[in-house]
Amino acid sequence: MTSRLSIAVVGGTGAAGRAVVQEAVSRGHVARVLSRHAPDDAARVPGTTHHRVDLLGDDGAGVAGDALDTALAGVDVVVDTTNGQSPTAMKVLTVGASRLATAARRAGVGRVVVLSIANADQADYGYYRAKVEQERLLAGAGAATTVVRATQFHEFLELFLGHGGRLGRWARLGVLPVPRGARFQPIALVDVARALVDAAEGHAPAGGVPGPGPDATTVTIGGPEILDARDMARAWRAAHGSRRPVVGVPLPGPLGDFFRGGGNLVPDRRWGTVTYREWLTS
Ligand SMILES: NC(=O)c1ccc[n+]([C@@H]2O[C@H](COP(=O)([O-])OP(=O)(O)OC[C@H]3O[C@@H](n4cnc5c(N)ncnc54)[C@H](OP(=O)(O)O)[C@@H]3O)[C@@H](O)[C@H]2O)c1
């Protein structure tokens, strides 16, 4: 049986982070949630404490650093589930990860777990490059590190179907746009959280490979099935009672190339258990 750990989940108010906090608490661990904004009462996981930390605080190692040191004092494990999409916010994956690694080292944290993306190093895409940099920086925190690279979450297709995201102009025409020629192997956040907390406890899913640091392991996890984006959209449409037609449109740029080439798929790493349809109906 694993002893009770103190786990700091950085980005613990986000989609993945909150699932990690819930999983950690359900296993009897003590979870600290670190993010810029405190969760409201409805989103707060009972039994957790929140520490207001901005990894990009513009005062260098000032306020952000002091708050970080307080938040990490006495912590056994740091789990990084932060995220940022715009060029400025994305710096949380690089500048922020560097600060987090320094603070984790200062606090003598024993283990670091990083949530990353399956095959992130195989796409020439700025966001993915930042993820690989985040992995590398945190593996330099002087702690045993596990990078957990997951395939796209079940929520990912919402980016296109919910409001169009990068295909927004198609959504405004009243269709459900999906990236043409793409397939996904989506995974449920509960499965991702299970893997991250397993890693926090020191028994990550099997099949890890060494790197990206001297005491680091990278393990890749995927969802239980590989689905054509169009089939996912049809299932989404049925679950949402929508009648909008599904239209495959080209996703431009290197991310489109990556998806069309199947770079996001890890058929031999089916680790999650919850299927897309099960998730849609749950
Ligand atoms: N979406 C996918 O399909 C997928 C697949 C595999 C891996 N991933 C990875 O999973 C990770 C988590 O994604 P997510 O969708 O759960 O993200 P999310 O919902 O956007 O949550 C991001 C979290 O980071 C915090 N944060 C952002 N900037 C911060 C800063 N400067 N200082 C401190 N905290 C900050 C946010 O809280 P505040 O805003 O309050 O600070 C929030 O708690 C990402 O790194 C992503 O690459 C995603």
Image (spheres, grey):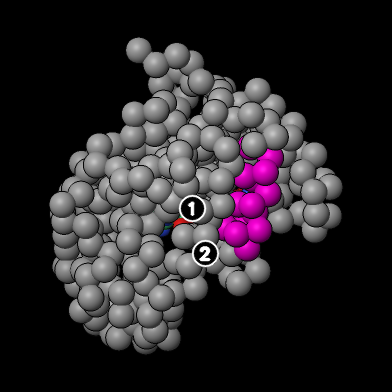
Q: Residue at x 59, y 64 (%)?
A: 90
Residue position marked by numbered label 1 in the rendering:
135
Q: Say if the magenta span includes residue 93.
A: yes
**Which quadrant holds the N terminus?**
top left
* Amino acid on which disc 2 is placed: Ala
x and y percent of residue 71 in the render? 69, 33
Residue position marked by numbered label 2 in the rendering:
130
User: What range is drawn magenta here?
Assistant: 91-104
**Which quadrant holds the C terminus?**
top left
The local crowd at label 2, few if under 14, some if 14 to 19, many if 20 or more residues have their Cα within 10 Å, is some
x and y percent of residue 149 in the render? 36, 51
Q: Is residue 170 above or below residue 138?
A: below
- Looking at the magenta stretch, what is its main secondary structure? helix
Q: Residue at x 51, y 53 (%)?
A: 136
Identify the element where label 2 is drawn: helix
Identify the element where label 1 is drawn: helix
- In the displayed structure, does residue 225 sit left or right of residue 88? left
Q: Residue at x 77, y 43 (%)?
A: 65
